[in-house]
Amino acid sequence: PENSLPTEAFSEEATRNVYAEMGQRVSSALQKKQDVILDTLFVTPLGRQIYQDLAEKYDAGFTGIWLDAPLPILKKRVRSRTNDVSEAKEEHVEFFHSLFKPEQMEWPVIDASDTQDITLQRVFHSLKSLHQ
């Protein structure tokens, strides 16, 4: 991006607004029987439940997965980004990581601490075992 987002863009209110807009777009797609992939931070149970409920409302399948890695790896990845549209900074990673409660996670948690290829293999294995 040419300009960084202001700090307010990361507030709870802004997050709720983004999730509401995503919900409207998901509803529109599901009404048309289109497939949907959401790639965002679902750190709270409520944030995850919203989209599961939408899938159920439109009689669509739903599979949630959570990619996780140790905090030092996540911070290193953020530091090493170049020419990336993400606004994430190390302090955002620390903040959101502190909110994540593995004991509240009802989705499979996938170890994403290795390469993208290894992580993708883990995701496929998890999806395969979920849908057997």
Image: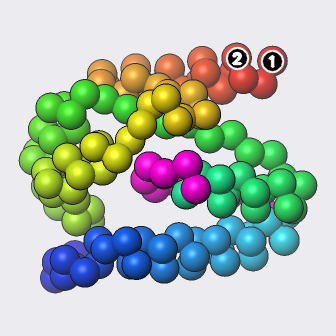
Q: Residue at x 12, y 38 (%)?
A: 76
Is residue 120 in view? no
Q: Main secondary structure of the magenta part?
A: loop
| Position in image of residue 83 (x %, y %) | 17, 61
- Name the amino acid type tagged 2: Ser
Q: Position of residue 52 (x, y in %)?
A: 71, 52
Residue receiving disc 1: 132
Badge 1 vs badge 2, beta-carbon distance below 8 Å: yes
Q: Secondary structure at mark 1?
A: loop
Toward the right, the furthest residue is 59
What amino acid type should be assigned to the residue bearing mark 1? Answer: Gln
Residue 37 counted in the magenta span:
yes
Q: Magenta includes 89? A: no
Q: In which quadrant will I find the N terminus?
A: bottom left
Dot 2 corresponds to which residue? 129
Q: Looking at the picture, how far across and down is residue 89, in whole percent?
A: 15, 57
Kindly identify the residue that appears in the image at 11 percent across and 45 percent down.
Answer: 80
Q: Which residues are magenta?
A: 34-46
| Colour scheme in use | rainbow
